[in-house]
Amino acid sequence: MSNSFNAKSTLKAGGKEYTYFSLKALEGKTDLGRLPYSYKILLENLLRHEDGANTTREDILALATADLRKLPAKDINFTPARVILQDFTGVPCVVDLAAMRDAMKALGGDTKKVNPLCPVELVIDHSVMIDYYGTKDALDKNAEVEFERNAERYTFLRWGQEALQNFKAVPPDTGIVHQVNIEYLARVVFEKDGVLYPDSCFGTDSHTTMVNGIGVLGWGVGGIEAEAAMLGQPSSMLMPDVIGVRITGRLAEGATATDLVLTVTEMLRKRGVVEKFVEFFGPGLANLAAADRSTIANMAPEYGATCGIFPIDEETLNYLRLTGRSAQQIEIVKAYAQAQGMWWAPDAPEAQYTDVLHLDLGAIQPSLAGPKRPQDRVLLSGVKANYRKAFEAEQKMRPSAGPAQVTDQGRTYTLRDGAVVIAAITSCTNTSNPSVLIGAGLLARKARTLGLATQPWVKTSLAPGSKVVTEYLKKAGLLADLEALGFNVAAYGCTTCIGNSGPLNEPIAKAIQDNRLSVSAVLSGNRNFEGRVHQDVRMNYLASPPLVVAYAIAGSTDIDLTSEPIGKGKDGKDVYLKDIWPTSREVQEAVAKAVTAELFEATYAEVLEGDARWQSIKVSKSEVYNWDAKSTYVQNPPYFRGMTMTPPGIRPIQGARALAVLGDSITTDHISPAGDIKLDSPAGKYLTERGVQKKDFNSYGSRRGNHEVMMRGTFANTRIRNAMTPGVEGGVSRHINGALGPVEPIYDVAMKYQKEGTPLVVLAGKEYGTGSSRDWAAKGTILLGVQAVISESFERIHRANLVGMGVLPLNFVEGQSAASLGLDGSEIYDFEGLEEGATELTVNAKKADGRVVTFKASVRINTPVEWQYYRHGGVLQYMLRQMASA
């Protein structure tokens, strides 16, 4: 690579000399001190990859001299240092690579060209479910069931580890990808062949941003974009706005990092930070531990930002020491950050930002978020009123039949609306943070001492993001207290946070369904979208781990824990939350004694080896994968069938029909569910026809390696509402061919249109595709035959994924919507002006009576590279043709 700035320089760290690309080479052309930390990382990336073609001198100067208050619409390239995967989204990535090897062979190319060119690390964390809970053997039993369900997928991943270079897999029952990333995988500063550069990563999970908390720039991308990065393709992006958040003060007594991140999420959602970077700075950073910072960074997708990053400082180094990084690595991080002006100190000058918000840590109050969106924060004192308001709204569509008598496990009790039926300490958002885990343990100890217990209808679980958590809870003597309240370690994985909450006990589930009860879940997760946690649970609240334990004791969200007793102690007296809430000092002292570097070093010493189950998997060592036609987990996808070296170009969209007309905030969970597969659904019927029993269906997420299941599950969420079928909830539509057809599953309707050769469109409202970086939300869309999605706005990752799969993303012009234009899905749609580089086109929607509604739509293919992808039919086809011709 050429470099026109002569940016190569050297530095010494730990007695060794290293080369790096110095930002000081740009002095005199820009004021480096005014650049945000994140822009310095982007700038170094351009300097290091300058080649005069993909990255030019002009690109570098444009970024270096940009005025963040009025940025030009200029695209730049970014090449991450590595890619991290979780198994739900990682399996289809590896499936696609295996399919590309087959396609490369068919094109007469070298299959070994299809290989990751940067480190790729996959953590298996999304497959385990909470089938068993509240017992000492729950962990082992859940792991046993996990391996039984996922043997085909795990065998496939072991093949990938053997066949693909630069690919590692962290075995099941080890931890959650983002927690393993910050505790073990993240380098903060990378070293390769004696060259230092900032660690950065793309991840196939939207919460990849968690690593921003320790100064690593990374964000979630679709599996398609991740695969391109693996194969050496830079990602093109518009120069991002950077919203600065100036932090002051320190957290008040009783406030937790969870309360803080829910407040940040609410604040930034109101500001609007979609497709923007968020950067935290200010004197309050000195009062935020790295674990607290990582909690805030984790929920960047919930506040809508591309990333939420913190700079490198002394606290970053403290965290690296605590988690067992080598002294040499820590010296490299400090020396590099200081040499590049990436080091933060309390007296550091403040950078220029697009806009600056202010956050006083001292103003943070105990909070939850819910019952349906993570940005809907509610003070702890307001949860009862919040629940009742949501309950009243539910009654209009689904009236409750009132309390039900339940007999379960030898106990009889009354189950009411508002009952907490799931209380889960789950998710890397919070289980990565020792202060809130220790806090939960101390609360459990005080509750146990006073004679409190969890209510019998509550399904309790503790699923830490790494095994280190269990070790420090044991060391602090708190694990036994949590277990006494039913919070036994049930898994090391994402579990309830991603919908893997497992079944409710049958008598409880039956009572909920028969009496149409509106029950609740309280979880320490990052998402509570409708239908995500459990299909029978209508109200879902995000909370800190101590509050999860508290609500398990109370047994209901129809209670004000700030003023009403949480229960009665063994002396018969009322006990209040304040009686069992630990003080900040108690938490800090326990953390200091129990959480040590030795625990991290011992836990991660053999992290890649796995247990006996993992080691017993037999592995094929062939260069191409031997597909099993009978497998219901892994199948060769159809993306490359009939592919030639000539791209198809931009094809017209004429005579299209609407498959769905959807509202606002349609999430990727709505588009591509991750949870339970219903027996009578198209996916359930497919599995049944192949001899799979209902108990072995597993989840949609676990079957992402099989396109036949996933396309049948697209738009199959039981809570989605299609305006083409008013009054009917669930993934259904109508086929129109002269006459209006009956209400049918969306998959069945789409297949009828495919048989007729009719292209499809989807109409939607604001924030379409919000939530997880789920590539199957785009893959399923194209496989159903959808050629275009017209929305009022898109969430960043899903828009990119649609382009990556060859689906045209369009926006209604400001102020217009499907409703304002009178579109109900019965129309025939023709698109005019669709050509490369177009920023706007015309849509003609013909009504059944002959009237035509004509409107403009903005084309959301944002960069020249994205137009290349679209012209080739998708990014994978583009990359394959590039590799085959090299």
Image (tube, rainbow, N blue to C red):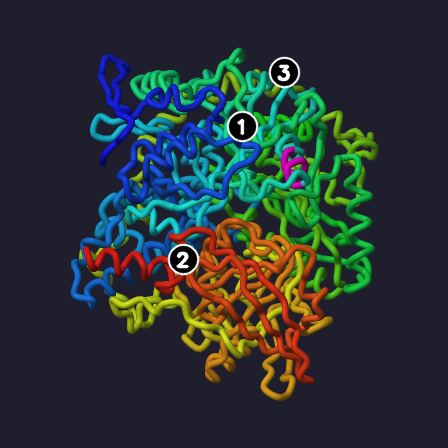
Q: Residues within 10 Å of mark 1 (few under 14, many from 20)?
A: many
Compare marks 3 and 1 and give the one earlier in the sequence: 1
Residue on which the image places disc 2: 867
Q: Amino acid at mark 2?
A: Trp
Q: Which mark is residue 25?
A: none
What's the CA distance linking mark 3 and mark 1?
20 Å
Q: Quadrant of residue 869?
A: bottom left
Q: Could you tell me if residue 504 is visible in this image? A: no
Is residue 77 covered in magenta?
A: no
- Residue at 53%, 13% in the rendered image: 346
Specify start and end residues of the magenta stretch as a single range.
264-269
- Between circles 2 and 1, the one closer to the viewer is 2
Q: Position of residue 276 (x, y in %)?
A: 54, 39
Image coordinates of residue 129 in percent, x first then y, are 50, 52
**Residue of label 3:** 585
Amino acid type assigned to the residue bearing label 1 in the image: Arg
Q: Residues within 10 Å of mark 2 (few under 14, many from 20)?
A: many
Single out the mark in the foreground, 3 or 2.
Answer: 2
Decide: is 741 above or below 270. below
> Of callouts 2 and 1, which one flags the residue occurring earlier in the amino acid sequence?
1
How far apart, in angstroms, are the residues tagged by discs 2 and 1?
Answer: 37 Å
Q: Is residue 163 left or right of residue 259?
A: left
Is residue 886 or residue 856 the one in the foreground? 856
Looking at the figure, which quarter contains the N terminus? top left
Q: Quick check: marks 2 and 1 in contact, CB under 8 Å? A: no
In the rendered image, is residue 234 in sight? yes
Which label number is shown at residue 293? 1
Q: Nearer the viewer, residue 639 or 697?
A: 639
